[in-house]
Image: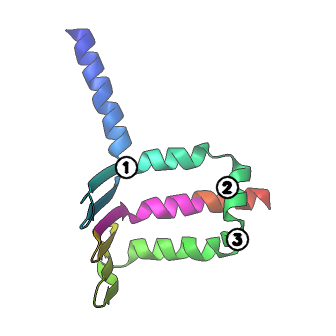
């Protein structure tokens, strides 16, 4: 009994650790063709781990064109964390509707078009942390 309890507690601690930074949610619903419906939850901690696993040279190479903008992007992300909940972008035309809003510490991107419906949400702090990590790699290389 104690081995099973130890394994269960270990699993719960691991799951809580993985989930502690929040989740990225991606949902896609096609309206034509196969009408695929896809829902993907991605723990932010796994994304951070994946970024940390990328060799620094590859990060620098992949982001070299954006390097000059990293301080501005990082500052914008930090400010986005501070602002109250609000709609940032809303576009409507004859066929498509796009809405980007900050709500409860997360960004929500919703696209509703003739062909599909797409919803993506992620904690703002996740973007801030990843941009800061990339900026740190560039700073060490300079």
Name the secondary structure under disc 1: strand
Residue at the spot x=58%, y=46% of the render? 52
The residue identified by callout 1 is 42
> How has the structure been colored for display?
rainbow
Relative placement, left or right, of 11 versus 76 is: left
Residue at the spot x=28%, y=31% of the render? 12
Q: Is residue 74 magenta?
A: no
Location of the N terminus by quadrant is top left
Q: Position of residue 118 (x, y in %)?
A: 30, 67
Q: Position of residue 95 (x, y in %)?
A: 29, 85
Furthest toward the left, the residue is: 1
Spatial CA span between label 1 and label 2: 21 Å
Q: Which residues are magenta?
A: 117-132
Name the secondary structure under disc 3: helix
- How crowded pointer 3 is (Cα within 10 Å; few <14, some 14-19, many 20+) is rated as few
The residue identified by callout 2 is 59
Q: Nearer the viewer, residue 80 or 46?
A: 46
Name the secondary structure under disc 2: helix
Q: Nearer the viewer, residue 126 or 39?
A: 39
Q: Is residue 122 magenta?
A: yes
State which tag comes first along the sequence, 1 or 2.
1
Spatial CA span between label 1 and label 3: 27 Å
Furthest toward the right, the residue is: 142
């Amino acid at each position: 009994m104690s081995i099973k309890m130890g394994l269960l507690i270990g699993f719960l601690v691991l799951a809580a650790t993985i989930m502690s930074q929040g989740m990225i949610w991606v949902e896609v619903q096609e309206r034509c063709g196969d009408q695929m419906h896809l829902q993907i939850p991605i723990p932010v901690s796994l994304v951070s781990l994946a970024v940390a696993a990328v060799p620094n040279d590859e990060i620098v190479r992949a982001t070299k064109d954006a390097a000059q903008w990293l301080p501005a992007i990082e500052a914008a992300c930090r400010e986005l964390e501070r602002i109250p909940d609000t709609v940032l972008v809303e576009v409507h035309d004859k066929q498509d509707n796009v809405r980007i809003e900050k709500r409860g510490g997360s960004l929500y991107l919703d696209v509703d078009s003739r062909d599909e419906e797409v919803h993506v949400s992620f904690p703002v702090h996740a973007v801030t942390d990843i941009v800061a990590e990339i900026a740190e790699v560039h700073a060490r290389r300079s």
